Image (tube, coloured by chain):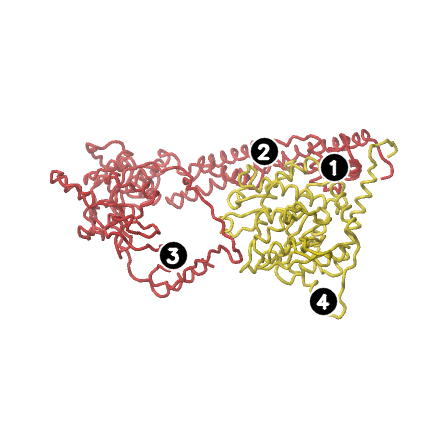
Amino acid sequence: MTEVDSNPVLRARLLAKLREAHTSLGRGMRVRQREQGLRNATEFAAAGLLAVLIGKGLVTLATGIAGPWGWGTSLTVVVLGAGLGFWRAGAFTPLPLDLARVAELWDHQAKPHHSVAAALEFSLAPQSAWEWATVHAGTREAETLTLPVVPPSMGEPPVRAVLGGLGALLLAILLANPWGSPSEAAAKSRSLPGMTKASQMQPVEPTEDSGSPTERSVPIPGRDDPERQNLTQATPGTAPTDPAFEKSPDIAPRPGQFGQGTVSSELRTGMPQAGQGDASEGAKTLPEPTTKKPVTKPRKDPPTQTRKLPEKGKREAASGATVGQGTSGGGAMSPVKSPWSQKDQSEDRPLAENPTEESVDEEIGEEEARSGTQPATKDRRGATSRDLSISGPGEGGEGRGGPTPQKKARGVGSLILGLPIPDFVRGLLNPGTTKVTYERVPPLPALGATWPAAPTRGRSRPEPSIDLRAPTEARKAALREWLLKFHR
Amino acid sequence: MSQSASPTVDPALAHAEVEKFRSVMEALRQEIQRVIVGQDEIVMGVLATLAADGHVLLEGVPGLAKTLLVRTLADTLSLSFSRIQFTPDLMPADIVGTMVLREREAGGHELRFEEGPISAHIVLADEINRATPKTQSALLEAMQERTVTVARRTMPLPSPFIVLATQNPVEQEGTYPLPEAQVDRFLVKLLVGYPKESEYHAILERTTGQASERARPVADGNTVLELRRTLRAVPVPEQVRTLAIRLVRATQPDSELAPEVVQKCVALGASPRGAQALLLIAKAYALLAGRYAVSCEDIRAAALPVLRHRIVLSFRGRSERRSPDDIVRAVLATIPDTAGV
């Protein structure tokens, strides 16, 4: 540090070295781009080919048709995947490299003892001995060290690569279309043994309300026409019902019907089912079922616990203020008179909108039958307050029983019947922390797409009975152990 | 190097100052290591904070030589030292001092200020979280302004002045967590861990024999002040300053730089005082490494001790058992150097 160069000389030396590094870095970026394109192309093509093979295998498993498969789809997917990989590599935009960025890369990769970027910055106009020293040291190191020609990352973190691969896989599956078109499938089905040709099927005159097969397979909400149900009802045991189609909203099962998904699945897939002939014809020639299973109607179900209640019990269940019965049946009215419950369960809401208020609905129907002269809501009052406050005489008249004693907190583990769990009311969140931070967290709407409103229908099956038996000792012990661990 | 010019300042001066800084710090470290076995990072953190004109909060379970480290540091410096054992019944007047009625020789009485133990160069606040927040707050003015105010009189504290506080993280019954304003005044929070197995041998050999090592003074107050002047002169490049700012802002849950874990688990992030502390400790690290300017790696090395106690976890963060160190590590992983590399 005895000889001192002037500032312009030092800066010129530093800039020359940085330009040299800039050139080598740019060359390295282009090399990496090509390598990335090749790797992407290979991976995407392999993923597409794999998807095609998996799709064919699934079709074979589902239908028993083992081919022969043409290679047209596979080749298309491979070529498309390779092209997509190159396209993604071409979409990489190499980082703009100026000299300051090259200096920072130098510091990041070569990790010199003295910062080259700081030397470049201070070389403009060094103000103090420290800045001079920084410029000297940085320049000297830039001249002695060699910047590893490793270009900066071009924005291909592993997550994005995986997402890209998954996207390509999805695209490949869609393009592969392992089920093929209905005409191709029908053509293949003619060559298979045991299949009935469509021309051999007896034509059946369509019924008067029969439209297209797709229209008929879609149940219309709110209609309970038994004939329509019989038309769309298939013969039991003709083919296994595809659960995926059962879950489909447009072909949802109707109440009391079993196995009606067969027709829908035929129509959707276009693939013939064994022993049923052509799909389109099969839809038109819906045969009468030989053995009809009893159709269970929701209205005629065995009466649930709510319906067993007497008139007084109905009102109590509706208010949710039952004593000693729990709230398993739910209440039509809010059990707690709080702002949130008032927003969610308003008393002035039309009762018919709630599907759980069947008893009230029937009651209204009875009142209307009697000319509607007797109001059905004469005994309705606000629900009993369960706020944790002393219900004193000042409030008064809240609930049918008058002022009630102070309510206790609910929902702690100790209130589970038969479980000797101590209440962990310690005020400590973690062992070793004596400070509790309170936060006011506003309610946030749930993320995701909103579900469209749809008319509700009755249950297709009887409501399950509630098991009110006391838990076994083993269950009690397991639950208690879990709760204790949870509190710890 | 043939072309010589006449620069305004000779870079050799900076070189000399760096070498002097390193030699003094190395002498202090060696002297402390004669008594303290291992804990290199803790020792260097304390020395860096001493040079950065800050205060240290040492946290660790009992028996890890926290108090011994502070006493040894006081031994290596020819400075006054006082130890305050914080207890629940300690009062602010017990720390800062009080006015005492005294008899004059000439007759009559007068009120005179009796200095408290805070009036020393090196103050050990032992088990600081055992005193009430009222008493803990007595240190606020002393630590920030280096003065104490009693009975409308403000008196400066000796310089250099450093507070080294200890607390242990497990015994929380009957303790009082430090208020955020108090914690923020500590430049660094160092977590003292258990020694390695090899270090146990040396510890037992040194502490269970007849002879016990004691550190000798190798520096005085003027040397410490000179170290501080040297540290303040270290320049910070724009890129490094930007990184420090972005790191601090990323700890704030409302910032657009905050990673997801910060947004969910942090209630309060670091303040501008945190950025100041980050740069000061980074300067000390740069000097200790023999550099003339602060680099990004110095900032990253200083992030954990400087930022961990300035982050207040939210309820969710506590319930997910996150630690402030997790948050700082997530911030370090998220925020790149300015180059985006």
Label 3 to label 4: alpha-carbon separation: 53 Å
Q: Residue furthest left?
A: A370
Place of residue B117 in the rendered image (x, y in percent of width and height, measured from the top left) = 68, 56
Residue A209 picture quarter: top left
Marks 4/1: CA–CA distance:
47 Å
Q: CA distance from mark 2 to mark 4?
A: 65 Å
Between marks 3 and 2 in the image, the one whose residue lies nearer the viewer? 3
Amino acid at circle 1 = Val
Q: Quadrant of the C terminus of chain B?
A: top right
**Alpha carbon separation for disc pair 3 and 1:** 63 Å
Callout 2 amino acid: Ala
Left or right of residue B327, residue A210 in this image: left
Nearest the camera: B263 or A188? Answer: B263
Q: Identify residue type, mark 4.
A: Thr
Picture layout, residue A384 above or below residue A180: below
Using the image, tell me which numbered label, if any, was put on residue A116: 1
Asked whether the beta carbons under mark 1 and mark 2 sit within 8 Å of each other, the answer is: no
Dot 2 falls on a residue whose secondary structure is: helix
